[in-house]
């Protein structure tokens, strides 16, 4: 039978390689050559196993039948058959790699989602987080507007204290008594809290996202800091 370049090496070739490996192992005595002898012995085992596997594959009925069919083809047909087989093997390997990639991505989403779900903050933790956001972000932006005499008078009338001296803490108490508790919904991986800083007639809806034991303002949220209608709602109640 003709021997094609694309076919595995014959058992005779493997035997020659085994013989060479044994000679290298025999020359690998002590000292620095001992490691070379051990490596050669290891390669001998590998080549022996590879030779047995290839020999069994060559004798398999399917492989024998395929080889006979290819040998009956003209030279051009043989090259075409080899190309088709190569393309088929490449397609199978690509499909296998894609399947493994999808499996890895699925496992990443599953375990990542489970981790995020376990780290979602509690509903009780929202009010301290809201107070911190109010004092650090919201109040500094509305404080200049509250300095106006009419608005400051309304706030002092409702609180019964001098807000110019009490500052942000009393202002937060006013807003908290009107806005809280927030409407909190659980979305498995995260929690969503919605707070109305205005009134029902003139709302200022603010959305917060809770994830990884942390509350933060939702991205791209626009807040109307000029809307202080909450003061009118309280002082006229």
Image: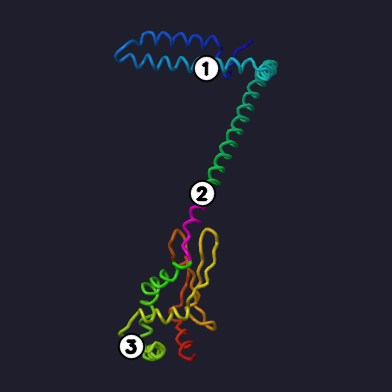
Q: Is residue 78 left or right of residue 134?
A: right
Q: Residues within 10 Å of mark 3 (few under 14, many from 20)?
A: some
Q: Is residue 65 left or right of residue 108?
A: right
Give the residue at x 39% y 79%: 172
Q: Is residue 120 left or right of residue 148?
A: right
Give SS at disc 1. helix
Specify the quadrant of the image occupied by residue 87. Answer: top right
Residue under circle 3? 162
Look at the numbered discs 1 and 3 and tell me whether their residues touch, using CB distance below 8 Å: no
Query: Relative to the observer, which residue lies in front, 222 or 7?
Result: 222
Q: Nearer the viewer, mark 1 or mark 2?
A: 2
Give the residue at x 30% y 15%: 32
Q: Nearer the viewer, mark 1 or mark 3?
A: 3
Query: Quick check: 194 above or below 48?
Result: below
Q: Residues within 10 Å of mark 1 (few under 14, many from 20)?
A: few
Residue 111 is marked as 2
Give SS at disc 2. helix
Query: Relative to the observer, which residue lies in front, 226 or 117?
Result: 117
Give SS at disc 3. loop
- The x, y position of residue 65, in whole percent, is 69, 17
Q: Main secondary structure of the magenta part?
A: helix
Furthest residue in direction front, as rendered: 124
Look at the numbered discs 1 and 2 and tell me whether their residues touch, using CB distance below 8 Å: no
- The x, y position of residue 37, in whole percent, is 37, 13
Residue 49 is marked as 1
Give the residue at x 54% y 41%: 101
Of the two numbered discs 1 and 3 on the same chain, state the one appearing first in sequence: 1
Q: Which residues are magenta?
A: 113-122
């Amino acid at each position: 039978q003709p021997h094609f370049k694309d076919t595995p090496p014959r058992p005779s070739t493997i035997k020659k390689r085994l013989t060479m490996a044994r000679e290298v192992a025999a020359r690998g005595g002590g000292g620095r050559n001992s490691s070379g002898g051990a490596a050669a012995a290891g390669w001998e085992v590998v080549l022996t196993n590879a030779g047995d596997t290839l020999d069994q594959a060559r004798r398999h009925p399917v492989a024998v039948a395929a080889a006979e069919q290819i040998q009956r083809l003209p030279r051009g047909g043989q090259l075409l058959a080899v190309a088709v087989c190569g393309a088929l093997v490449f397609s199978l390997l690509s499909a296998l790699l894609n399947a493994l990639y999808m499996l890895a991505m699925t496992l990443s989403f599953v375990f990542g989602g489970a981790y995020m779900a376990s780290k979602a903050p509690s509903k009780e933790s929202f009010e301290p987080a809201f107070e911190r956001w109010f004092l650090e972000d919201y109040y500094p932006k509305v404080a200049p507007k509250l300095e106006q005499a009419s608005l400051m008078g309304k706030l002092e009338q409702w609180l019964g204290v001098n807000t110019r001296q009490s500052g942000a803490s009393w202002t937060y108490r006013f807003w908290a008594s009107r806005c809280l508790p927030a409407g909190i919904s659980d979305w498995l991986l995260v929690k969503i809290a919605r707070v109305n800083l205005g009134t029902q007639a003139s709302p200022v809806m603010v959305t917060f996202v809770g994830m990884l034991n942390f509350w933060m303002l939702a991205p791209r949220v626009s807040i109307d800091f000029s809307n202080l209608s909450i003061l009118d709602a309280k002082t006229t109640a």
